[in-house]
Amino acid sequence: MPGTKFYITETKIMMEILQKGENMQESSTVPEDVKQRINWLLIFIIICFSVLIISLWYLQMIKGEELKERAVENCIRSLVEDAPRGNIYDRYGEMLVTNRPAVMVSIIPAEVGDLEELSKRLSEIIGLSKEVIEQKVKKYTDNPFKPVKILDDCKQDKIIEIEERKGELKGVVLEVQPRRNYLYHEFAAHSLGYVGEIDREELQRLGNPKFQGGDIIGKTGLEKYYDDILRGEKGGKEVEVDALGREITLLLYRKPVPGKDLILTIDKDLQVYGENLLYGKKGSIIVSNPYTGEILALVNRPSFNPNSFSSGISYSDWEKLSSNSDYPLTNRSIQGVYAPGSIFKVVTAIAALEEGVTNRKREVYCSGTFESAGQVFTCWKEFGHGSLSIVDAIAYSCNIYFYTMGKELGIEGLSKCMHKFGLEEKVGIDLPAEALGTIPSSEWKQREFKQIWFPGDNINLSIGQGYLLLTPLQIHSVISAVTTEGEIYRLHLVKKIISPDGSVIKEIKPEVYRKVDISSSTFQTVKEGLRATILKGTGWRANVKELSIAGKTGTAQNPHGETHAWFMGFAPYENPEVCITVFLENGGEGGEAAAPIARAMLEKYFNIQK
Amino acid sequence: MKEKLGKLTENLDYTLLFAVVILCFYGILMLYSSTRIESIGGEPYFYVKRQFLWMILGFLFLTIIIFIDYHKLVRFSQVIYFMAIVFLVMVIIFGRSTYGARRWLVIGPFDFQPSEFAKIALIIFLADFLSKNKSKLDNYFYFLMPFTYAGLLILLVFKQPDLGTSLVYLAILIIMLFVVGVKIKYLILTFFVALSSVPLLWFFLQEYQKKRLILFLNPNLDPLGGGYNVIQSKIAIGSGGFMGNGLFSGLQSQLKFLPAQHTDFIFSVVGEELGFVGAILLLGLYAIILWRGVKIALEAKDLLGTLLATGAVAFLFFHIVVNIGMAMGMFPATGLPLSFLSYGGSFMISNLLVIGILLNVELHKIKW
């Protein structure tokens, strides 16, 4: 009877339940003192739980907001992606400046296990001392997941070794950054300029949000002048990262806009040729198209390697460059001011012809000496040239003829002509830091020296000596004006701005920058003189039978030692295509030193085989 | 048999059992949240599956232990204690070493942690010893006996080294001694003796343990080393706020800023994802368990039952308070897991065994 049995069991249990309280009371043999202690334990447990709840309340309800921010900070990272700077090409599209990937060796402090061991291993590879590596890592500031740069621009073989030993170099990461690469090193360094990290002063001036500390910016040359165009726009992203700094989700991404490219007016081959001609010398060569203002070559020597600035130049290297007595960083053609010497006679000649002081036919007798106001001035040819017309005076560079002109023109006549050429102003090339020469006048002398203008000052000025100082670029604007017979085109180095896909964004059109108000017959006469200079005069060393060159030599005395050698000219005489200025600092005689260089440059340009 | 089963179903403490079951599933959920992203072999349920298996196994053991009247169980107390010693010695000799500590014995496909089962052995052994010798404990010699028994286990575990677990043994011992009624002055005296031996103990501490203690005093000293855990854990809990960031949405936990977030720091995941509400719910469940435990101890039939229940309460209480306190930066990171929540097979089973002991004492308070 299973049913009955079940019933009985049920009743039995029910009875037991009814008796339960009593039952337990009877059978419990737990001493009272133990129960008392258990109550104390219960109180202790309650206290502990209360403390837990209170501190939970404190953490979550009171400090909650603050800690939430920290949680977000923990895992949101803004990463800047630099835009590649625009490339620079020569006029024929040959690449001159680009970017190369530079590999930086960094350490993520948060990922390092044993720093000492890691430093030791890394030190063996990259050659940096173990202590230096440790120091750098220990100095990390805010974010332990942010890589600390250990070595910039790591060499290829070292990179390979790091890659190979990756397993034992936990925490080491290789990061690639675009680095400015000047393909031909010293080539046109002064024109191209260099880049570097933005400094405090620039940051204040140019400011946020466009720039941040650490940004790369053009410091000199075209890099600086066209910085806005070359630089492009930084991109960046906000990412959610995990504890190891690994990207989990991309929250925001802005693609960097690459910088625009520049196509220069420079002819790479001609520039290289010029730089080789001036190798070991100090000076500059300017070659341009007078009818467009396009500069074909802008040579400056001595030069420097702008690549050394790309990775951040070391202090000792900077010291070496900046304290060099030959001033390799100076762009002589636009920043150096020098006495022009006899090439200035072209300006004096134009002034005299324009003011009617002389004409094509007037002859002046040169005995070798000239007296003015009790002072005796001499011609470079000791026993004189005899009687000369203005054309021959230019050709033989006779001082006496121009002394006479200077005396008769006076400072007013000379000033008027210099003003027509715009010599008191900058030429306005597309490069930063162009210098301004010194254009003397009676007011200027009064202001500077508290002295009146002496007649003798006219005599000195007429042959480009005395107080007069000009930049080679200013000289070049004079010869440009003579070549075109009155029009100075704006001299420039950039021909086109193109986007990375190759489409032309802007083309720099020739622009007449200054009209020189001088009669055509005056220019004709002077040009005749310039041609005669090459054919029979002081510039004979620049003569080549295949090409009709016209020009003027100059040998300028200066307080810094040896004379400066000058040459300015154009070719072909009949139908000019280019004009050229050669300047050699303390280079000796213009005819001996500068003229052959000018000839060589022109031969190169006109492709005359020797 | 049927009779026994009937009694069982009627007298079981369902409140306690129910709280434990809810806690186990709460734990499984949090474990899934903290491990789903990066599990071993890209399998999001890797940890959850294993934990679930341990849980089933644990309940199986729990069911078995309920059936054995604790009076019968303690007859084997010396054997159990001896086995615990043997296993702990085996760990030191053959144990699998991880992170410079030997804590696991590998048996077939399973790793198991004898120090977990030694906790239960200690509870049973002490309950037996103390209930038999209560009257003699005023004698200082008898008072020191349990210290010797427990001390042997503590030393063996300390040697592994596992500072946290050896502290659990100590807590169980002290609480059981307190409850059995030893003179408070004895306990205080012992406390000072222990305190004065701390400098001596310092020599025996492993380098990482010393570091942990220093970092507890100032976690910002090394925000990436040992202090990192505590800082990240506090950030995680705090950022949860009142309602939490939502399940599976904790920034800190989902992005793995929390170290050991599925084991020692699982409470931080609760705090971050379920907020104050979720954490209080959790504490509430623990409170129910401890309350039932204390009630069972009070209402036990005899001193032996009371002491067994007390040991069980001490075990659970110490793990809960120290683990949660550690997650909030109140205690040094001693590496103690959180009952029913932290991942770990041996720990899960030992917790369920302890619940089994409580249920057993409750069940056998009436005559069968």
Image: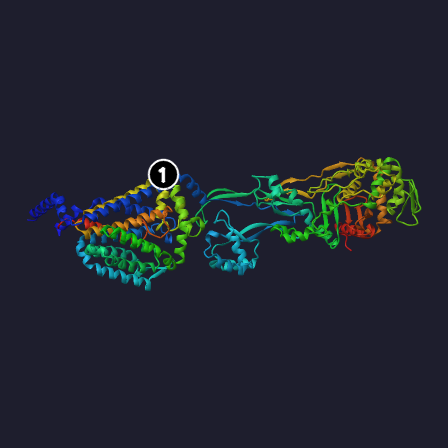
As helix, strand or loop, the secondary structure at mark 1 comes to loop
**What's the residue type where badge 1 is placed?**
Phe
- Chain of the residue on which disc 1 is drawn: B
From this viewpoint, is residue A239 visible? yes
- Colouring: rainbow
Q: Position of residue B258 (x, y in %)?
A: 40, 48
Instruction: Specify the quadrant of the image occupied by residue A113.
Output: bottom left
Could you tell me if residue B223 is visible in this image? Answer: no
Residue A529 in the figure: left or right of residue A50:
right
**Residue most toward the bottom?**
B93
Give coordinates of residue B249: x percent, y percent: 38, 43
Which residue is label 1 attached to?
B242
Q: Where, by quadrant of the figure, is residue A472 drawn?
A: top right
Side (left or right) of A166 relative to A443: left
Closer-to-camera residue (A520/A52): A52
Relative to A355, is B77 above or below? below
Q: Is residue B77 left or right of residue B224?
A: left
Q: Looking at the picture, how far across and down is residue A453, in whole percent?
A: 85, 38
A541 or A240: which is nearer to us?
A240
